[in-house]
Image: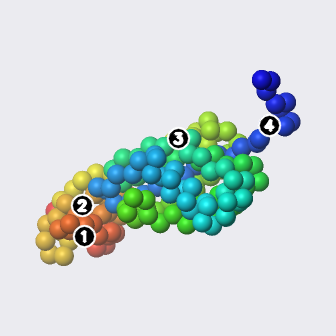
Amino acid sequence: MKHLPKHLRPRWRYLAVELETWPDERIGRRSFQRELWYAGQNLLGDPGSADADLTVMRFSFADGRGEAIVRVRRGETEPARAALACLDEIDGAPVGIRVRGISGTIRAAEENYLRRRGQDSEERNVVFGNEERVAVLRDRVGDVRLDEAFAGATDLDYDLA
């Protein structure tokens, strides 16, 4: 079977997406893809989600932070962003999602938007609520481990032990 001529091939755009959740949560590529498809189908309907053709091309996730490249048809980037905005949890874990940028190639999306990992996390002992606790710190914010959960805090809420 012959390939389509270049002018008839579908054109794609690539969304560089950042994910953030509690440090002890685990999110996989398949579950992210599944939730993205459901969000697209619920928001855009069957014809709209078929037009957008949301596909996860690259995915990495560790220590509560992750990155993904989502492929979408050209001209459907705004509906795709809206579908991504509808995601608030994946596998029961609350998640925050940010679109860092849109590019015409996977390589450009990775180089321009995903290789800026300036925020590394570290575990430290902090004083929170008059008790010494373990916290995962990123920049000036942290997630303080309570008994069975985490509490989000800024550097004004805790003291380094």
Frontmost of labels 3 and 2 is: 3
On the image, the x and y values in percent for residue 32 come to 48, 52
Give the SS element for disc 2: strand
On the image, the x and y values in percent for residue 142 come to 32, 63
Mark 3 to mark 2 CA distance (whole Å)? 29 Å
Check the image and name the residue furthest to the left: 131
Q: Dot 1 corresponds to which residue? A: 158
Q: Are marks 2 and 1 in contact (CB under 8 Å)?
A: yes
Q: Are marks 4 and 1 in contact (CB under 8 Å)?
A: no
Tell me: 95 left or right of 52. Answer: left
Tell me: 136 left or right of 49. Answer: left
Q: Residue at horizontal 37%, vertical 63%?
A: 92
Q: Which mark is residue 9?
A: 4
Q: Are marks 3 and 2 in contact (CB under 8 Å)?
A: no
On the image, the x and y values in percent for residue 143 come to 30, 63
Check the image and name the residue furthest to the top: 1
Give the SS element for disc 3: strand
Quarter of the image with the C terminus in it = bottom left
Q: Which mark is residue 58?
A: 3
Q: Dot 2 corresponds to which residue? A: 135
Identify which amino acid the numbered label 2 is placed on: Ala
Q: Is the residue 68 above or below the residue 24 in the image?
A: above
Identify which amino acid the numbered label 1 is placed on: Tyr
Q: Residue at horizontal 77%, vertical 23%?
A: 1
